[in-house]
Image (cartoon, helix red, strand yellow):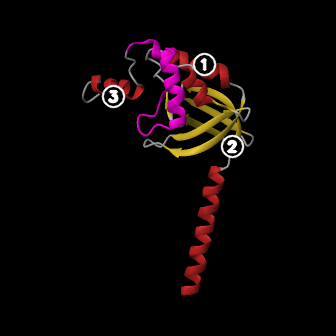
Amino acid sequence: MKAKLIVLFYSLFSITSLAAQMAQDPIEAKVIEVIDGNTLVAKDENGEEWKVMLAGIDSPELNQQFGNEAKSFLEAKALKKAVTITLQGKDRWGNRLAVVMLKGKDDLRVELLSKGLAWTSERNPIPELEKIRIEAENAKKGIWQEEQPTPPWIFRRQQTLMQEKGS
């Protein structure tokens, strides 16, 4: 009985490890929809759709200044184009986070940050991305043209507070 449990344990461990390893493999896909400035949907060669948010950045909400510009920029860069998606886990709401590369070399996060169309993450920003954001801010690009732009996470909290209770 003990030997069977050990075999079962190692079998489950192997399957779990294999699944985790497969989840980290890059996904080759084509962008079929841009939802907002940092969220897109891509379809892989098997027809599976992958809705992902770009990891480590946050673009303005669509009803926020520069929100539509961020979405339009992402559409121009990625819509109907081949991408490589590397999953990075999920956020606290269960959204898939990913690094999405065009032609294997152009990181969409870097593209958005360099144009001033995104912030780095609210918590624990990635230093390499933060450097690009600061360069855009110093150059007064995009959102950084405003004196005190409202980060999207603050904007979302403000919108939630403005909703009527019980709605």
The span shown in magenta is 119-147
User: Which quarter of the figure is the C terminus placed in?
Assistant: top left
Instruction: Determine whether label 3 and label 2 are within 8 Å by CB.
Output: no
Cα distance between the residues tagged 3 and 2? 33 Å
Name the residue tied to disc 2: 27
User: Which mark is first along the chain, 1 or 2?
Assistant: 2
Q: Residues within 10 Å of mark 2 (few under 14, many from 20)?
A: some
Name the residue tied to disc 3: 157
User: Which mark is first along the chain, 2 or 3?
Assistant: 2
Q: Position of residue 9 (x, y in %)?
A: 56, 74
Q: How many marks?
A: 3
Q: Amino acid at mark 3?
A: Arg
Residue visible at 43% across and 40% down in the picture: 124
Residue visible at 49% across and 25% down in the picture: 134
Closer to the camera in the image, 30 or 166: 30
Q: In terms of secondary structure, where does tag 1 sit?
A: helix
In the image: residue 92, left or right of residue 56: left
User: Which quarter of the figure is the N terminus placed in?
Assistant: bottom right
Instruction: Determine whether label 3 and label 1 are within 8 Å by CB.
Output: no
Q: In the image, is residue 102 above or below residue 117? A: below
Q: Amino acid at mark 2?
A: Ile
Q: In terms of secondary structure, where does tag 3 sit?
A: helix
- Disc marking residue 73: 1
Q: Is residue 145 visible?
A: yes
Q: Amino acid at mark 1?
A: Phe
Q: Residues within 10 Å of mark 1 (few under 14, many from 20)?
A: some
Cα distance between the residues tagged 2 and 1? 23 Å
In the image: residue 44, left or right of residue 35: right
Cα distance between the residues tagged 3 and 1? 25 Å
Q: In the image, is residue 16 above or below residue 4? A: above
